[in-house]
């Protein structure tokens, strides 16, 4: 199935690699040149053998009992993700979430740039947000094709998400980053990455609840 | 260790349950009364036995060869997460991301409410965003204590995140939902849920790249 390519790289690894990257950037800032998996593991609360395995996917090997050169490791992760090439993306839905995404510091570091936004609301169309123009939604299909844009970001309300996804796909978009709290159905050959904010929230609240129920919480608070 | 309570419920399960919940809400809207794991699995592209296992954590059992009553299942997930009780939270950083979070439709469904925002910028302090007042950051510690708020949301730039987390913790906050692209160090007894947006992006872009490299992508496009 094309919509689910056999990924030789596990998704948890893909999710951890940017975390290592951010962490290594911080190390570099404070002048650190060499780092070991043990050290990374301690700081990020992860298992060192797992870290070694994750990093190996980028094609790098550390020196036993020494570790990795921080700069070389950063470069290896950058190359792995192709962050040296900028992926241009269109965003639909220039409400608060859309604006937050357009203005988010740090996407450029990951080779990602929102080059235009689309919306339906006449009062929003024509605005410029952080240098990004808001265009009428009706133009998205033709502009996707003309500009050969392959990534779309959906930041609309839930009820609009599916329709917007279909417009994007009709324009040739192959990767959808979905922030709308709705499941999107996409045909084979299109990758959908759901970013349901409420999921992280639910996990946090449940952990907190379990902590409270365990009784340890109360003891801690009373200390 | 208190910061990492032994969770009898796996995190992937915790992450999937809100997804089932959203999906079931949609089913309810279109008038569906009974649903099976096979059906859910088909729609959400998940393994039915896994779904059955996940749902069992909420204390529900389906009827063999029939399934679950949609409404009862929804109620079971709500009770499991405690979404009937509202968790009140403070947010720090009333920039675009903070505003997006304050205005995000759908958190209330998950028993979560941001009741006040805090910022350092004089031009933002005193504003009201979607009914939520922005207060000076210096007040957060005393207000946390007085209002007994246990959840904090960080939507600041990376460099401010650790300091803000420490102010929250000093005020008695035990669960931090972190949107700043920075790792937060917290003492035992405090749960940190990181929401690094760039991670989802990296996964999407890498999958797209692998799809393209597999050659299937080009064939698809040329069809």
Image (cartoon, coloured by chain):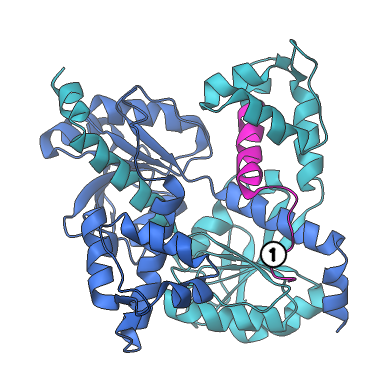
Chain colours: A blue, B cyan
Identity of the residue drawn at 88% across and 66% down: A215
Task: Where is residue B141? Give x, y as percent.
Answer: 70, 83
The range drawn in magenta is: B1-24
Q: Is residue A71 above or below residue B177?
A: below
Identity of the residue drawn at 68% across and 48% down: B108
Q: Is residue B145 above or below residue A82?
A: below
Residue in the foreground of this view, choosing between A208 and A149: A208
Q: Is residue B48 above or below residue B187?
A: above
Residue B10 located within the stretch drawn in magenta: yes
Identity of the residue drawn at 43% across and 63% down: A51
Task: Where is residue A156? Give x, y as percent.
Answer: 44, 40
Task: Where is residue A59? Give x, y as percent.
Answer: 25, 58
Q: Is residue A125 visible?
A: no
State the image quarter where residue B31 is shown.
top right
Residue in the foreground of this view, choosing between A27 and A57: A57
Q: Name the image quarter holding the N terminus of chain B.
A: bottom right
Q: Name the image quarter holding the C terminus of chain B.
A: top left
Chain label for disc 1: B
State the image quarter where residue A66 is shown.
bottom left
Task: Where is residue B38? Give x, y as percent.
Answer: 62, 17
Identity of the residue drawn at 21% across and 29% down: B217
Residue in the foreground of this view, choosing between B51 and B148: B51
Q: Is residue B145 above or below residue B22?
A: below
- Residue identified by numbered label 1: B89
Q: Secondary structure at mark 1?
A: strand
Q: Is residue A32 visible?
A: yes
Q: Residue furthest bottom?
A: A31
Looking at the rendered structure, the number of numbered marks drawn on it comes to 1
Residue A43 located within the stretch drawn in magenta: no
Residue in the foreground of this view, choosing between A114 and A93: A114
């Amino acid at each position: 199935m094309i919509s689910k390519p056999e990924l030789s790289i596990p998704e948890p690894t893909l999710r951890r690699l940017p975390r290592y990257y951010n962490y290594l950037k911080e190390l570099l800032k404070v002048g650190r040149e060499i780092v070991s998996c043990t050290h990374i593991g301690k700081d990020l609360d992860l298992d060192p053998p797992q870290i070694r395995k994750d990093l190996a996917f980028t094609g790098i090997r550390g020196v036993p009992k020494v570790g990795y050169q921080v700069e070389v490791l950063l470069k290896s992760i950058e190359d792995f993700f192709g962050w040296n090439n900028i992926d241009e993306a269109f965003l639909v839905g220039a409400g608060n979430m859309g604006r937050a995404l357009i203005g988010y510091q740090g996407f450029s570091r990951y080779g990602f740039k929102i080059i235009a936004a689309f919306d339906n609301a006449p009062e929003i169309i024509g605005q410029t947000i952080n240098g990004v123009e808001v265009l009428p939604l009706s133009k998205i299909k033709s502009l996707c094709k003309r500009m050969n844009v392959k990534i779309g970001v959906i930041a609309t309300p839930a009820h609009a998400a599916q329709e917007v996804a279909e417009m994007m796909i009709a324009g040739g978009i192959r990767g959808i980053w979905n922030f709308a709290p709705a499941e999107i159905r996409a045909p084979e050959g299109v990758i959908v990455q759901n970013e349901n904010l409420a999921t992280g929230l639910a996990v946090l609240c449940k952990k907190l609840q379990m902590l409270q129920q365990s009784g340890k919480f109360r003891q801690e608070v009373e200390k």
